[in-house]
Image: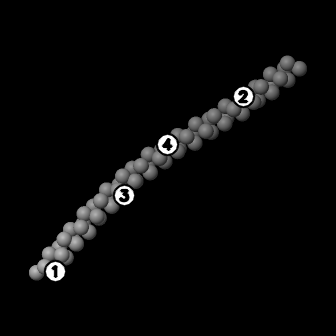
């Protein structure tokens, strides 16, 4: 009886260990993905700011042309 319980506990432990490994790998993948997304977001924010400045410059030039 004790051997059966021990075998059952050992099986449960093995399953928990496998789950832990899968979750650990998934967590690492998610962290890597998050880092990539943060970098992409920063790049997009820079591009957005640059586009905003360019548009503002075009508007200023158009207003100057209207004044002439």
Residue visible at 25% across and 63% down in the picture: 53
Judged by depth in the image, the label closer to the viewer, 1 or 4, is 1
Report how far apart the C-alphas of labels 3 and 1 lie in the structure: 33 Å
Quadrant for the N terminus, please. Answer: top right
Q: Position of residue 68 (x, y in %)?
A: 10, 81
- Residue where numbered disc 3 is placed: 44
Q: Residues within 10 Å of mark 2 (few under 14, many from 20)?
A: few
User: In which quarter of the view is residue 15 placed?
Assistant: top right
Residue visible at 76% across and 29% down in the picture: 11
Q: Earlier in the sequence, mark 3 or mark 1?
A: 3
Dot 4: element: helix
Judged by depth in the image, the label closer to the viewer, 3 or 1, is 1
Residue visible at 71% across and 30% down in the picture: 14
Report how far apart the C-alphas of labels 1 and 4 lie in the structure: 52 Å
Q: Earlier in the sequence, mark 1 or mark 2?
A: 2
Q: Are marks 2 and 3 in contact (CB under 8 Å)?
A: no
Report how far apart the C-alphas of labels 2 and 3 lie in the structure: 46 Å
Q: Residue 66: which numbered mark, if any?
A: 1
| Nearest the eye: 10 or 61 | 61
- Residue where numbered disc 2 is placed: 13
> On screen, 31 above or below 40?
above
> On screen, 14 above or below 68?
above
Q: Residue 57: which numbered mark, if any?
A: none
Report how far apart the C-alphas of labels 2 and 4 lie in the structure: 27 Å
Q: Are marks 1 and 2 in contact (CB under 8 Å)?
A: no
> On screen, 13 above or below 25?
above
- Residue where numbered disc 4 is placed: 31
Q: Earlier in the sequence, mark 2 or mark 3?
A: 2
User: In which quarter of the view is residue 26 placed?
Assistant: top right
Q: Earlier in the sequence, mark 2 or mark 4?
A: 2
Q: Residues within 10 Å of mark 4 (few under 14, many from 20)?
A: few
């Amino acid at each position: 009886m004790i051997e059966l319980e021990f075998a059952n506990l050992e099986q449960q432990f093995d399953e928990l260990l496998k789950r832990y490994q899968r979750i650990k790998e998934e967590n690492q993948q998610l962290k890597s993905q998050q880092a990539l997304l943060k970098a992409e977001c920063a790049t997009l924010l820079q591009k957005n700011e640059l586009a905003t400045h360019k548009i503002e410059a075009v508007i200023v030039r158009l207003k100057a042309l209207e004044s002439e």
